[in-house]
Amino acid sequence: MITGTGIVKTFKQRGKVLGAREVMALRGVDFAIPKGGAASFIGESGCGKTTLGRIIAGLETYDAGEIIIGDVTMSSLRPKQRQPHYRKIQLIHQDPYSALNPTRTIHQTLYAPLSLRARQTGRPRSWIEERAAEVLSLVGLDPGTVLARYPHQLSGGMRQRVVIARALTVDPEMLVADEAVSMIDVSLRLGILALLKDLRERLGVSVLFITHDVATARYIGDDGELYVIYRGQVVERGPVDTVIADPVHPYTQSLLSAIPVLHGLERPGEQPVMPLESLDESQSDEGCLFARRCPFRGERCTSERPLLAVTEAAPQQHACFYPERRSVIARPMSEV
Amino acid sequence: MSVLLESSSTSATMRRNFWAGVWRVMKRKPSRMVGVVLVLGFAFMGVFGPMFYPAQLPRDPNLITSPPSAQHWLGTDDQGRDVIALVVTGSRYVLLAALVTALITVVVGTGIGLFSGFKRGRWDTVLMRLTDMKLTIPGLPLLLVLSTVWKFGSPTQMGLVLGLLGWGGVARAVRSQTLSLRERGFIEAARGLGLSTTHIVGKELLPSMAPYIAMNMLIAVTGGVYAQVGLFFLGVLPYESNNWGQMLNTAVFRSGALTVPSGLGFLIGPLLAILLLTLAIVLVVDAMDEIFNPRLREE
Amino acid sequence: MSERSEVTIKQSTAAREAAAPPRKEAPGVRISGLTVVYKTPAGELPAVRDVSLTLEPGSITGIVGESGSGKSTLALSLLNAVQPPGRISTGSVEIDGLGDVVGFRGERLRKARGQHIGYVFQAAQNSLNPLKTVGKQLLDLGRSHGVDDLRGLVREAKELLGRMGLDGARVLDSHQHELSGGMRQRVGIMLALVLNAHLVVLDEPTTALDMITQANILKIVREVHAERGLTTLVITHDIGVVAEVADRLAVMYGGRLVEQGPTRQVLAAPRHPYTRGLIKAIPRLVGDIDEAQALPGRPPTLVTVPKEGCVFRERCALRMDVCDTVDPQARVDEGAYGPRIVACHAVTVKERA
């Protein structure tokens, strides 16, 4: 179980002339990912989902809030002591091309973390070789052909599998996959997604999926939770299928409306929502963060910030004063 | 089982592959081979050259500052010594000092650059201010001042001083490389996996910068040669042992090689040696990128 | 492409040319037998092999393919802009009102790009000059094409930007880094259209853009296409993008065009096993998630693509012996919404049976 409460992160941007402007990347985010479970963060780029993922993986600091891994509160430990806890959470980078050292073979890449592991647990050297072959087989690669290769000799899909295999060398409890398939050929994407899903089922590794593509998030774990993040705030949170089928926050609805419709196979939703203007980070922080773009904004929205809560409108948590169900997603022709 | 056997011998295989790759890269352009041969030639000259000549080179009082002839291919100096013999025996001091210079430049520069770029924060600020300060010290005037108190009798002393004056640029460059590399996915992954800093710096960062460091090192060798030759040529250092800069100084200021054609060979000898060494290094530097990049090393 | 399909295409073009004289608006494009080769250490290898494709005037055609499928090379051929070590080895690209651009060189080619053909580069690539404002780049473009009325050009640019929901004056005063991805993409579209080109090529118009921005850009592409009377070609790896905007869909694999037809028909009933696999590999928002199936194997590269026989056979579930040796011929079926073309032995066999 990995939980976070009230995570706040601000970035300082260099000011134009005087002083620095602060950008709120995360404005008090709560989350909980059960052991072996799945969760997805969705939102536009710059919404803070990647920053949150990096904070969870221990690669970024945060200004306020708590991260609890298992039952250990991270802030109660000194930086050096946190390391073994954060090691249980492995980040899968978006770019499999920069995630592997081009000057090292796959064997060398896997050997380093495995030999560390062997030293810690007092296992013999032969275990390292066995385990290297094992993790590669787990991700669907043939150790005999892959081990001696350099990254450039592998395709994007194979590289991403190696990256996942490397993460598995430390027996992680959770994989944080940040847009893990966006740079991979389309015909190979589902293979990687299926692998993550499979690892969840076989090894009980929980998966945190960070993406702007809701459908892939659903594929990884339709039993998990979906967090819709907008400008550093979770605006809707609930079981994947509930949020997809019955979104109530206008931002979630705009995200879902924007998914391309496969005309001929699907018919578009009847009430698509289109934001009034495009995302502008410099917009005022007063009131609801989405108010300026929201087609349904009311009077309250510009003065008061709605908080994440469950109302009569929907069973999932949402941060909206005027939640309303709208049919936004495309449905297959066969269903109607 | 075959997998296990294969991977346990991978490191040996890889080493073999590396040298096979280096050979392939060198063969790709004949100019690189020429460069390597020349560099090896200079190394041989520096190490073994002086052994072929007596400690005191024979003087021919009948042939003082003579033009090139069949007997003395590049003529003789003002004491009647063969110029080629002088170039060869004088190479050891120059080359050894240049090598020490390069080693110190690269080791200190890389060390400080790496540390500064990897640690960032307070250390970075302090070290970079130090580097900036060092970079603002004008090298030549300082050397001139130093030479009044220190005679640079041994080449290692010479190299030490030149090296300690020269690492600033390398440190800055390595730091900026480190800063950009440490944001790369594989460095971040290594940190996330809990690998030691030694591993990250030594096995992940350094190899990625190897071509860069190797190039800097080779270029520092030429820099070291120029600096010493310049100092000796200006005559700010007293004559201790024979070397190329000393020869140029004598040729120009004592034998009037710039005005008297008979002293021309005396001038050309050391100049030619410096020129060839620079050329050799430029030709070898050309191959560095391909040698250290496994993708370019192939095909 | 088979001889038969070429004949059909030629016939249909001939019929159209007789009916309507060539206009500046919405040109038709006929690519026939196009092969583009790249020089590699292993000799000259085809990135695009014997591709024939017709862009009907006023239509939006979408080409879908993975990396290495040759889709970008095909798009560049439309401008005769394949860079060495690549070259167009055979085939022609006939554009109404211009002629066969494959023969164009130098000044004539440069004029054709921009004034007749607008090219919008990938959103991910920074195709704008980071050191100059958008306005300066617009003026450079105008001058290099000998536009006398630069004021008119700026007015036109502002109008186009305004049409796409941007503040024209502000955008022209901005540098690249001051614009978001979606804004840059709109600037790219403006620069492609401002010289009044009526054939527009969009290369990966929404890659690296967010969903909402993508939906916005696609809407703009559709609207601008209709309003200005364009012929549009969209190159993408994303079937969803094509499904949203295109009238016709063409699928490329390993340098070959394996299937094409009206978008809705191809999506509803794909015939080539690759097209089927691609559509099946898209995770959906509703229904059984296990319906999505990954395609086995991986796409070929320039070097690994089979020299003879079907390029897809390594990953194909319907592979037969004949696929190893014989290149499948393109079969053309005329339909109410336009021809459907598929190049697959298995499909041919099944329909004969």
Image (cartoon, grey):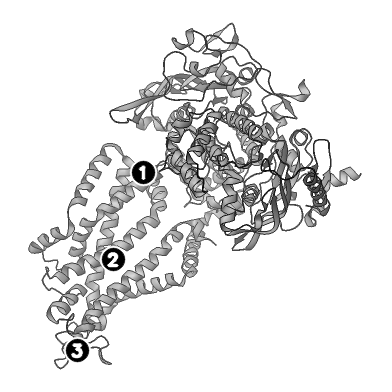
Q: Position of residue C42 (x, y in %)?
A: 62, 63
Task: Write the residue at 75% across / 58% down.
Answer: C308
Residue denoted by label 1: B179
> As displayed, is residue B97 above or below residue C104?
below
Local SS, label 1: helix
Q: CA distance from mark 1 to mark 3?
A: 57 Å
In the displayed structure image, the side of residue C31 where residue B7 appears, left or right: left
Q: Residues within 10 Å of mark 3 (few under 14, many from 20)?
A: many
Chain ID for label 1?
B
Q: Position of residue B252 (x, y in %)?
A: 16, 77
Residue denoted by label 3: B66
Q: Nearer the viewer, residue A125 or A143?
A: A143
Asked if the residue under mark 1 is in contact with the one under mark 2, i.e. CB atoms within 8 Å, the reply is no
Residue denoted by label 2: B222
Chain ID for label 3?
B
Q: Position of residue A284 (x, y in %)?
A: 41, 19
Q: Are labels 2 and 1 assigned to the same chain?
A: yes
